[in-house]
Amino acid sequence: MAAVRLQSSIYDLDLPELTDWVTGWGEPAYRARQIWEGLYRHFYRSPEEFTSLPRSLRARLAEHLRFETLLPLKQLASSDGQTIKTLFQLHDDKAIEAVLMKYERRRTLCISTQAGCAMGCVFCATGQMGFKRHLSSGEIVAQVMYYARLLHQQNERVTNVVLMGMGEPFHNYENTMAAIDRLNHPEGYNFGARRFTLSTVGLAPLIRRFADEGRQANLAVSLHAVDDETRSQMMPINRKYPIAEVLDACRYYVAKTHRRISFEWALIHGVNDTPETAHKLAQLLKGLLCHVNAIPLNPTPNYRGRAADRQRAERFKNILEGAGIPCTIRMRRGIDIAAGCGQLAGQMIPSPAFA
Ligand code: SAH
Ligand code: SF4
């Protein structure tokens, strides 16, 4: 029992669980709230910083709970300084990445939900590396806390969190939702549920579950193709959940929540950026409360496709918009440091000193 308890990261606990620990040590329950505020409002990262707690309680915290959840190994900034990517080592030496993107007043974090990914999309660097493991809820939370602390030191705050880093959030459904709930807690970080966006490869049953749970986070679905043959070649999961099934689940989501859904579309020259494809996509999405986020493909080591150029991207967008489907072409960000969509693979190899 003691061995298991020693392993717990403090960020893995919700407030009732933390209260159990604290009362189990014979301390009053309000101490748990103080710790919670210290973690999520003051961004303390070691027991010594909790100076309003009795020394004995700080010692208990240090003895039983792990504060160091993620070890930042390396940080890279893009040439314009607006994108920062951090490589973190996990306690079992796996690695993940998270990215901060500054754009005007927005401070958007792109965080990971798994080390690697089991879905194997051929155009994605995370898919190309395969699945290592799920992240715990605390490991997801700790990515946000890391950047929240960093921004706090500059008198800034995180404005948006997108779960579009490494991994498939719906494959790690429970931990992902627990992390969102923890970050959303009103007495803690209190980050608005509507400022989260989740992107899924299209796990249809979980899109339905997400809708049934009435969650407020925004939903994005990676579509990328209009016919099953093309989509299955790009995204093997399409053999299990083909396009019609994914779109049925999306319609269910919109009917149930009345919320707009975003479709992600990585524009690949000659593969999915043609006028025929755009027309077919408009037909497929007709009548659905949605929006298409098109992004020219980012380069990855093991995929030969290339990005649609600006002209082809504009043509694609114009066809969709002409048919009444709103479409934005997203800027490519952080490409020089491989921090763009689909480029995260923990490839900033740890130096031997840390490994
Ligand atoms: N697993 C989830 C979320 C992480 S990927 C998902 O697949 O939706 C985030 C987004 O980046 C997805 O829309 C994904 O399709 C897209 N993406 C992956 N590789 C890309 C690449 N090389 N260029 C552009 N977008 C890519
Ligand atoms: Fe996984 Fe998403 Fe990459 Fe596909 S695109 S391999 S689901 S991270």
Image (spheres, rainbow, N blue to C red):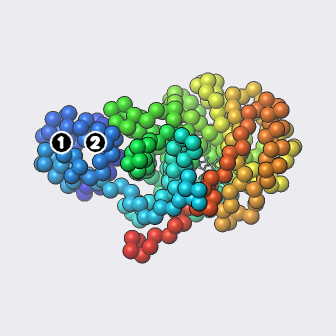
Q: Residues within 10 Å of mark 1 (few under 14, many from 20)?
A: few
The quarter of the picture where the C terminus appears is bottom left
Name the image quarter holding residue 79. bottom right
The residue positioned 22% from the left and 46% from the top of the image is 50
Mark 1 is on which residue type? Ser
The residue positioned 78% from the left and 53% from the top of the image is 308
The residue positioned 64% from the left and 41% from the top of the image is 221
Q: Residues within 10 Å of mark 2 (few under 14, many from 20)?
A: many
Name the image quarter holding residue 7. bottom left
Q: Secondary structure at mark 2?
A: helix
Q: Secondary structure at mark 1?
A: loop
Tell me, yes or no, whether the two marked residues, 2 and 1, touch with CB atoms within 8 Å.
yes
Q: Nearer the viewer, residue 40 or 149?
A: 149
Q: Is label 2 within 8 A of ligand 1 (CB to nearest ligand atom)?
A: no
Q: Is residue 32 above or below residue 10?
A: above
Q: CA distance from mark 2 to mark 1?
A: 9 Å
> Which residue is denoted by mark 1 in the rendering?
52
The residue positioned 52% from the left and 27% from the top of the image is 214
Observer able to see residue 173: no
Give residue 30's position: percent from left, percent from top.
20, 33
Give residue 237's position: percent from left, percent from top.
65, 50
Mark 2 is on which residue type? Gly
Residue extending farthest to the right is: 276
Q: Is residue 21 left or right of residue 112?
A: left
Give residue 36's position: percent from left, percent from top.
29, 39
> Which residue is denoted by mark 2 in the rendering?
38
Name the image quarter holding residue 263. top right
